[in-house]
Amino acid sequence: MAKVDFKNLRVQATIEGDPIIVDTRKELGNLVWGAARDIAVSDFGKEIYFSDGPIEVGEETAKEILSILDISSASAPLRRALIEALTPKRLPAKKGK
């Protein structure tokens, strides 16, 4: 499960520049709401749209959002930022003693 702040998403908008903060709530919320194949995920689009801070995104919901992004016209930098935000961070395995 990931906690994502869709209002303050860090996007690397240019190759050499610093990341910028992008408010993705309205566009992403509308995209998910309208393109989801599942009612619960569609309703989650409304949660994104009206969110005012970080929200919990379950693993299955994150997968559905990422599949919606695959068919969208979202830019590569935005996709990259959302993939990073929605993909659980894996800790490296501990080495034996």
Image (cartoon, rainbow, N blue to C red):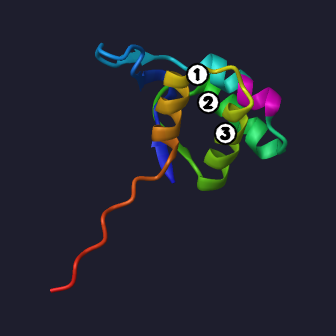
Q: Which residue is mark 2?
A: 48
Q: Residues under labels 3 and 2: Cα distance?
A: 11 Å
Residue at x 61% of width, y 30% of height: 48
Between residue 14 and residue 21, name the one nearer to us. Answer: 14
Task: Between label 3 and label 1, give the one nearer the viewer.
Answer: 3
Q: Which residue is mark 1?
A: 25
Image position, residue 49 (x, y; %): 64, 24
Q: Which mark is residue 65?
A: 3
Residue at x 69% of width, y 34% of height: 70
Q: Residues under labels 1 and 2: Cα distance?
A: 6 Å
Sequence-wise first label, 3 or 1 = 1
User: Which image quadrant for residue 41?
Assistant: top right
The residue segment tinted magenta is 31-35
Quarter holding the C terminus is bottom left
- How many residues crowd mark 3 within 10 Å: few (<14), some (14–19), many (20+)? many
Amino acid, disc 2: Ile
Residue at x 46% of width, y 16% of height: 22
Image position, residue 73 (x, y; %): 69, 20
Helix, strand or loop for disc 1: helix
Question: Do labels 1 and 2 touch, CB within 8 Å?
Answer: yes
Residue 45 part of the magenta-drawn span: no
Image position, residue 26 (x, y; %): 63, 17
Amino acid, disc 1: Arg
Image position, residue 68 (x, y; %): 72, 35
Instruction: Please tell me whether residue 38 is drawn above or below residue 6 in the rendered image.
Output: below
Amino acid, disc 3: Ile
